[in-house]
Amino acid sequence: MKVFKFGGASIKDANAIRNVAHILQSYRHEKLVIVVSAMGKTTNALEAVVNAHAKFAGNAQELYDAVKEQHYSILRELFEANDDVFSIVNDTFVEGEWVLDEAPNEDYDYMYDQLVCMGELVSTRILSAYLNKAGFPTQWLDARDVVQTDNTYREGWVNWDKTKANAQRIVPPMLEAGGFVLTQGFIGSTSENFTTTLGREGSDYSAAIFSHCLDAESMTIWKDVPGVLNADPRLFENVLKLDRLSYKEAIEMTYYGATVIHPKTIKPLQNKSIPMYVKSFLDPSGEGTEISSDTEDTYPPIVMVEKNQALLHISTLDYSFVAEHHMARLFSKLANQRIFVNSMQNTAISFTICVPNVPERIDKFIKEISDEFKVRKEEHLELITIRHYTQDTIDNLKKGKIVLFEERIRNTTQMVVRNIPPIERRVVDMAGSKAV
Ligand code: ADP
Ligand code: ASP
Ligand code: MG
């Protein structure tokens, strides 16, 4: 069997859904598990509902109704008015109404997961109804019956043994019955049957979980780009498609911010030598990118940009050296606050780290270590990572930037930069003293 994953962009409206059915036409005789995200930007819209509910803003129901209406308008384009899918989708949305009917739960992350999962639950209801109508028998599977996690809401940690046992018990008989099996990305459940999510953009990871647990022959994720490119096409021109990547290269790229693939995706595939393909849903016959083997190709320079970073310059209060026991304490505090260190450097009495700028977490961290360390924070920064760099690429990327921190190891270079603010031209007559 193979696993396919379709993301939000691939099912963003009625035409996009028709296009997915068209792609699947060529695979109708294959055993396929299809993992699907929420439609378009639905997850962002549901996050706004959660926020409004948590803050008693008074408009949570209104925002939720708008999400529902967006889905109904797509349904009206795809189905006759008397189709069963309308009541199926309506019943699915009721799970979210229950959350809104109650006072906001004090555990924000728990409440978030119970509501935000709606996006994937309804998108899969719609797509499976459409595929059945288009003549492709498709069974809908609740991913929460398979993917079991701990109760770290919004960042559920997979219990692999339980998930594997569930997958192997539930999915093969469904595939044997013929037709596609369609399920949700991004969601799982705790042992008490509460919904969890796996972290934003986590549907690629879900597909890898299913692939790993079911020993898939391959996994394909369908994106709005021709494959993995050597830089984000939204930020750079003249990017190159990478035809083949090793697992290692792909892990490094995704870790440093190539958002085309969720960073947790590669490991479960590599562990079972399952090849992964990144292909375009806009040009399904294109070759895409193959991520397989552990042997390295030669690569062109590959650039990743992580925005919204902060540098924390941490130094001891009493001028003692930053020693191993300090590091151990700092890292355990960072881990407690779930602050991920993207890069670091140290001198005798200071230690500098580049981290995503999440002010609530950073403030708590600074407070927790204030008995021993002082911290200077610089914000509004970008972390640029270049793999297989050339001097030309580095020079080009530095243009218009102030480099605050630079680090080079073998084939990777990292720079933390700030944009040089445009200097306002002073409208002053420099010959005299009068403004003009
Ligand atoms: P999905 O619809 O599956 O959620 P995403 O939008 O998360 O897909 O990922 C696709 C996007 O990733 C592309 O539109 C592109 O802008 C961005 N991207 C960032 N880095 C790269 C890269 N190195 N190669 C290709 N796309 C990239
Ligand atoms: N819908 C989720 C998100 O937007 C998961 C995903 O699309 O991968 O984060
Ligand atoms: Mg995505």
Image (cartoon, rainbow, N blue to C red):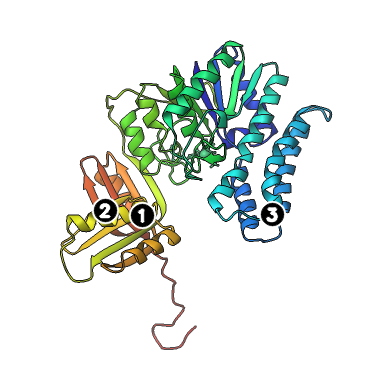
**Res. 138 image quadrant:** top right
**Res. 274 image quadrant:** top left
Asked which secondary structure carries label 2, the reply is strand
Marks 2 and 3, the one that precedes in the sequence? 3
Q: What crowding class fits label 1: few (fewer than 14 Cα within 10 Å), some (14-19), or many (20 or more)?
A: many
Where does label 2 land, which residue? 344
The structure residue drawn at horizontal position 38% and vertical position 37%, both measured from the top left corner, is: 230
Marks 1 and 2, the one that precedes in the sequence? 2
Question: Could you say where residue 140 lies in the image, as x and y percent from the top left?
Answer: 64, 24
Where does label 1 land, which residue? 355
Asked which secondary structure carries label 3, the reply is helix
Amino acid type indicated by mark 1:
Val
Q: Is mark 1 within 8 Å of ligand 1?
A: no
Whether residue 281 appears in this view of the structure is: no
Q: Nearer the viewer, residue 338 or 289?
A: 338
Marks 1 and 3, the one that precedes in the sequence? 3
Q: What crowding class fits label 2: few (fewer than 14 Cα within 10 Å), some (14-19), or many (20 or more)?
A: some
Where does label 3 land, which residue? 60
Amino acid type indicated by mark 3:
Ala
Question: Could you say where residue 60 lies in the image, as x and y percent from the top left?
Answer: 69, 54
Asked which secondary structure carries label 1, the reply is strand
